[in-house]
Image (cartoon, rainbow, N blue to C red):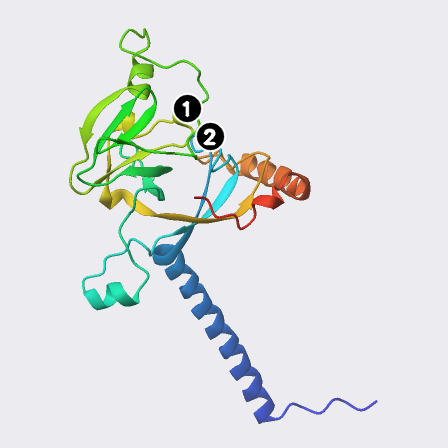
Amino acid sequence: MSEPAPRSAPDRHSARSSARETLEAALVAGLFLVFANTWVFRTFFIPSGSMEETLLVGDHLVVDRFVYGPAPTAIERAVLPLRSVRRGDIVVFRSPRQPELDLVKRCVGLPGDLVEIRNKALVINGKPVEEPYARHGDRFTGGVDSWHPDRIRRDQMPPYRVPPGHYFCLGDNRDHSLDSRFWGPVPAHLVKGRAQWIYWSYGGEPPPVEWQGLGASVRRWGRTLLGFFTRTRWERTFHLPR
């Protein structure tokens, strides 16, 4: 039986060149993903019902981190898709109380706006705001004679001027949301981006906010894989929350 002929020098050189190109492509792709995840897009999941029905527990979002980026010149503003936060934007930001936590709420008040809540109804600069996305699940309205102070703060808020460099943010599920009514406006430097679209919606067990150990994570991922096809809300895939 004849032995296979040894590979020639050009063949070995071609193999090394191909391996190097593959490695370089992988490194470039990795750097691009790190850059995109840091500056352009990031993922976020909904752990609570404070934004229902707009966002459901288990929705996984792509967050545009680039849209609110600084643009120092008029030319950059004209060319790049950059803009300031607008009323009605669904924004992701660090909690003013717990900076290690990310929150998602709807911006209803811009710097300088006069925000007021009258019997659960939002009033901006003296004019009532129509909010088809707002949900009120508690039929009781807190008033000055209410025995529950949080219900008063939730449903009745005197006119409040949003300070410069801040945003007033509320959850769409108004009766069950801890938001600017309770801890004040959101500083602009805590805003991380705008909710862009839902890339996956899982009706099962959402990921925990805090790390619960390797064993708990493995068990949770196992349950997610088993229920992926049956518990995924396919109709919400690539849904644009507005």
Labels in figure, total: 2
In front: 79, or 202?
79
Q: Position of residue 202 (x, y in %)?
A: 58, 40
The residue that label 1 is drawn on is 176
Q: Where is residue 45 in the image (x, y as percent from the top left)?
A: 47, 41
Q: Position of residue 213 (x, y in %)?
A: 50, 35
Q: Please give the name of the residue rendered at 20% of the width and 26% of the height, measured from the top-left corner.
A: 159
Q: Quadrant of the C terminus?
A: top left
In front: 48, or 67?
67
- Near mark 1 (Cα within 10 A), the count class, few <14, some 14-19 or many ≥20, is some
Task: Please say if 73 is above or below 25.
Answer: above
Q: Position of residue 152 (x, y in %)?
A: 30, 15
Q: Please give the name of the residue rendered at 40% of the width and 65% of the height, measured from the top-left corner.
A: 31
Is residue 219 rendered to the left or right of residue 119? Answer: right
Three-letter code for the amino acid on which mark 1 is drawn: His
Is residue 136 rendered to the left or right of residue 153? Answer: right
In front: 195, or 100?
195
Q: Please give the name of the residue rendered at 22% of the width and 68% of the height, measured from the top-left corner.
A: 75
Q: Quadrant of the N terminus?
A: bottom right
Q: Please give the name of the residue rendered at 32% of the width and 6% of the height, measured from the top-left corner.
A: 147
Determine the secondary structure under disc 2: loop
Task: Please say if 35 is above or below 171.
Answer: below
- Near mark 2 (Cα within 10 A), the count class, few <14, some 14-19 or many ≥20, is some
Picture quadrant of residue 146: top left
Contact (CB < 8 A) between labels 1 and 2? yes
The residue that label 2 is drawn on is 49
Instruction: State the mark number for residue 144.
Output: none
- Earlier-in-chain disc, 1 versus 2: 2
In front: 105, or 122?
122
Determine the secondary structure under disc 1: helix
